[in-house]
Amino acid sequence: MRMEAMLSFMKVEPLPQATVGQIIGLLEVLSDYRSKQEDLHELAQELQMDLDEFSPIVEATEILGFAEIVNGDIKLTSLGQQFVNADINERKLIFKDRLKRIKLFKELLKLLRKEELHSLDREIFVDELSTHLPPESADRVLRVAIDWGRFAELIGYSADAEEVYIDEE
């Protein structure tokens, strides 16, 4: 299984380091603007964030399909507006649907489903990701995946056992 896991993870793009709270915050800010489209640099300044701090959040909204970048402007998509208008349970369902389309989550779920208890030690994922990412990046990517997956109730994490598991079944 180790070789199979390694080969499938080799095609995975790392997730931007952005929390669910940061993603939701940006979407809500964009929704509050009348034009629903803002210059990235001006918005970063208004939010008192430098671009290095702001870029991963923007990238996350784009990966999830909630916003798009056009000529240096960020624009809320109709899905992003739907997400902002939704209640917490609807938000989780929308987020879950978006995560299931991301290669990293597809691979995580595939590995977890192969296990009898649908759980694996977090270090197995870090080791697999470390074969193509620096170890500190692999750990960060897994932390982001756990954050996003827990919000969506797609995957869970037991801190005591240090295990990642499928939460939706």
Image (cartoon, grey):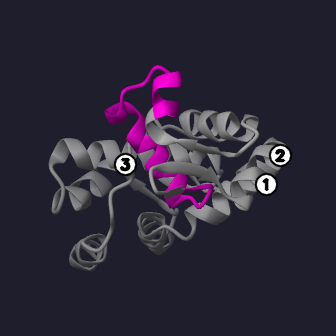
Contact between marks 2 and 1 (CB within 8 A): the answer is: yes
How far apart in space, not on screen, are marks 2 and 1 (Cα)? 5 Å
Residue 56, percent from left and from top: 40, 43
Judging by the rendered image, the residue that carries numbered circle 1 is 82
Residue beneath the point at 83% across and 46% down: 85
**Viewport quadrant of the C terminus:** bottom right
Judging by the rendered image, the residue that carries numbered circle 2 is 85
In terms of sequence position, does the residue under pointer 3 or pointer 1 come before the other? 1
Could you classify mark 2 by the number of other residues whose Cα lies within 10 Å: few (under 14), some (14-19), or many (20 or more)?
few
Q: Amino acid at mark 3?
A: Leu
Judging by the rendered image, the residue that carries numbered circle 3 is 142
Q: Is residue 163 magenta?
A: no
Secondary structure found at label 1:
helix
- Indicate which label's residue lies in the foreground, 2 or 3: 2
Residue 103, percent from left and from top: 43, 70
The overriding secondary structure of the stretch rendered in magenta is: helix
- Indicate which label's residue lies in the foreground, 3 or 1: 1
Contact between marks 2 and 3 (CB within 8 A): the answer is: no
Q: Nearer the viewer, residue 66 or 108?
A: 66
**Viewport quadrant of the N terminus:** bottom left
Magenta residues? Answer: 42-68
How far apart in space, not on screen, are marks 3 and 1 (Cα)? 27 Å
Residue beneath the point at 51% across and 49% down: 73
Residue 98, percent from left and from top: 61, 63
Secondary structure found at label 2:
helix
Q: Amino acid at mark 1?
A: Gln
